[in-house]
Image (spheres, rainbow, N blue to C red):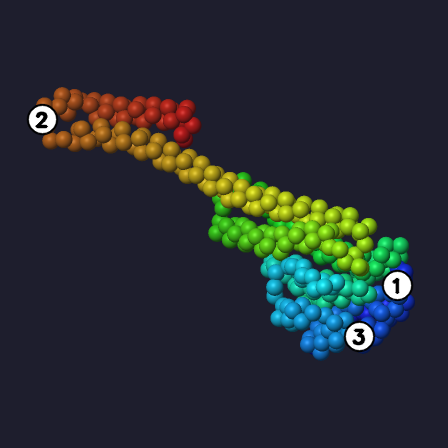
Amino acid sequence: MGHVVAAAAYHKGRKVTDISLEEGSEWAAKPDHFVWIGLRDPGSPELTCLQQQFNLHELAMEDAITRHTRPKLETFGDALFMVLYSPVRADGRLEFVESQLFAGKGYVISARYGNSASYSTVRQRCEARPLLLEHGEDFVLYALLSFVIENYRPLMDCIHGELEDIEETVLNRPLSQTDVERIHGLRRDLLRLRRQIAPMAEICQELQQLDFPFIDKHMRPYFRDIAIHVNRLLEDLTGLREMADHAIEIGLLLESSRQSITQRKFAAWAAILAFPTAVAGIYGMNFQNMPELTWHYGYFGVLGVIALGCVGLFANFKRMDWL
């Protein structure tokens, strides 16, 4: 069952009073007033109450109840409905927590699901800046959207640090199955992050172009600022994906180099061992006409030739850095 985290009425940038859920439309109808209602895990009763008060569109209500859609912005007359996702990483597992925003003349409603960062911080920031909060609903929308975008930066910095650690590990030892699985998991998380961040660029573009009574043209630079941050996140995501790909490529190249070195060593030792084997094979043939067989020092002479040949081959391979 959901509950109201905070609900307040504001007038010219300053909080007037806390209100109940049922008083929202009454305060929103007053001149130069707007209400900001924050919900946590709302159910049908809370959403139905708000729909009746603010005449929320039935399609927006349907999306709000069913949930689990992609980030998007939809307009219904002079009202809008926005779906955003905040990243949460716990125990190495990345999840996305849905937030829904309803906004219209005189009201902003935020509905948060799951264990994402609380919007109470956003409310405190806005109330501490009455000159900007005097803009009303559009500034609250900017603050909420900006807060959601901010949640992506620490996570991406964390992934960047992990990829740097993997790169150092790859340079010092061969890739293990654990390393490969870790890189694969990070690449998968980066793809999921991109799928959630990319639509926000479109949302910011639409907010700059909307001609709504509650969106002041002077707030459009603020939405443009968010779009810039979103584009930077997308650029950083591309860089992080390249880092993950490079880590795998470097690991494969180093492993190929290590295998090549090992193969050269095997080839060198095989050549050294082949020399005495060849000499022994010659004298192992069943022929009588072999002068060395009747020579008193023939055995020692052959051993000397084998030793000289092996030492010569060893020195040559050592010079070639094969051993």
Where residue 49 sits: x, y (%)?
Answer: 75, 76
Say if residue 200 shows up in the picture. Answer: yes
Q: Indicate which disc, 1 or 3, sits on the residue closer to the N terminus.
A: 3
Where residue 113 sits: x, y (%)?
Answer: 68, 68
Residue at x 34%, y 25% (from the top left corner): 313
Task: Determine whether 60 is above or below 191 in the image.
Answer: below
Which residue carries the number 3 mark?
Answer: 21
* Gap between marks 2 and 1 measured at Cα: 121 Å
Secondary structure at numbered mark 3: helix
Between 276 and 319, which is closer to the camera in this rendering?
319
Between 108 and 282, which is closer to the camera in this rendering?
108
Horizontal side, residue 131 vs residue 145: left or right = right
Q: Amino acid at mark 1?
A: Asp
Q: Nearer the viewer, mark 2 or mark 1?
A: 1
- Binning the other alpha carbons within 10 Å of mark 3 as few (below 14), some (14 to 19) or many (20 upward) gives some
Residue at x 64%, y 59% (from the top left corner): 71
Where residue 210 sits: x, y (%)?
Answer: 73, 55
* Gap between marks 3 and 2 measured at Cα: 114 Å
Residue at x 86%, y 60% (from the top left corner): 127
Which residue carries the number 2 mark?
Answer: 288
- Binning the other alpha carbons within 10 Å of mark 1 as few (below 14), some (14 to 19) or many (20 upward) gives some
Secondary structure at numbered mark 1: loop
Where residue 141 sits: x, y (%)?
Answer: 77, 58
Q: Nearer the viewer, mark 3 or mark 2?
A: 3
Which residue carries the number 1 mark?
Answer: 32
* Gap between marks 1 and 3 measured at Cα: 20 Å
Q: Indicate which disc, 2 or 1, sits on the residue closer to the N terminus.
A: 1
Between 153 and 122, which is closer to the camera in this rendering?
122
